[in-house]
Image (tube, rainbow, N blue to C red):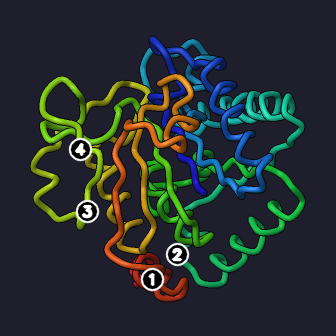
Amino acid sequence: MVIKIGTSVLTKSGRFDKKILKDISAQIAQFLKKGVHVYVVSSGAIGSGMTILNLRSRPTTMEALQAAAAAGQRYLMQCYEEAFAKDGFSTAQVLLTWDDLARRKRFLNAKRTLAQIQKWGLVPIINENDTVATDEIRFGDNDRLSSLLAILVEADLLVILSDTNGFYSGGSTGRSGRRLAVVRNMGNSIFSHVRDRRNSFTVGGMRSKLNAIRMSTDADIPVFLANGRDKRVLSRLFEGEDIGTLFVPKSGKARAKKNWLKHFISAIG
């Protein structure tokens, strides 16, 4: 299972929220104790750096963004290590760029490395390598990264934790429209409902999430979208409670190589 935790989940009132990270980590630990392999895609490095540096708005230059990420990544990993240690687990940091997954040799190396991390019983915490990524090799947001990672590890499920309790027919929030418990056979028409909502800490919006979700479902990986700030959100999802939205693939699992060719090869022409 791949679990993506967005910046909007890890920040509150413009500040990094260590408590919510602890709560989600504790929920993930319950799956780990049952033998489930979990890959955590975590945003928040730049947001953490902004908090440490007392920046009130997101930097606008590449060098400032990378410097904020450098300051924040260490603190972010420290928080994850402390949180998982309480349940007897240790973490491993994995930083990726698009180039790491777009080229077949690097793709396979990343896959083997992640498999070894799992074999050693560590919890992989994965993020874009913001300190070195440039416009040409960026994922753009961790929604896309989480989807590509789910394809990489041939995940059975992708969970995207954001600041919305699923997808609403009226847009990205529950202020209007009706929450869709299940979405099947995503088409282009679903994007007509989208109204992106961002702040100075976040990069992606609902449109970004839908693009990533469609990438996963096209690769036959189901996706849950839910509000990461809801109490016990992961536990409640897997207890069958009617929260969030489940996006259902069209068919059964496709071959890993076919998925890599479809989603990665275009990056290098």
Labelled disc at residue 102: 2
Label 4, on which residue? 180
Q: Are discs 2 and 1 less than 8 Å apart at CB?
A: yes
Which of marks 1 and 2 precedes in the sequence?
2
Quarter the N terminus occupies: bottom right
Look at discs 2 and 3 and give the one toward the viewer: 3
Labelled disc at residue 184: 3
Look at discs 4 and 2 and give the one toward the viewer: 4
Left or right position of 146 against 127: left
Q: Looking at this rendering, what residue extends furthest in the front direction?
A: 240
- How far, Cα to Cα, is label 3 from label 1? 27 Å
Crowd band around label 2 with a 10 angstrom C-alpha radius: few (<14), some (14–19), many (20+): many
Label 1, on which residue? 265
Which of marks 3 and 2 precedes in the sequence?
2
Left or right position of 71 against 85: left
- How far, Cα to Cα, is label 2 from label 3? 28 Å
Q: Which element is circle 4 on?
A: strand
Residue at 53% across / 15% down in the picture? 15
Q: On the image, which quarter does residue 36 sit in?
A: bottom right
Q: On the image, which quarter does residue 71 sit in?
A: top right
Residue at 57% across / 60% down in the picture? 97
Q: Where is residue 30 in the image (x, y as percent from the top left)?
A: 73, 40
Q: Are discs 1 and 4 less than 8 Å apart at CB?
A: no
Crowd band around label 1 with a 10 angstrom C-alpha radius: few (<14), some (14–19), many (20+): some
Q: Which of 164 and 245 is in front in this view?
A: 245
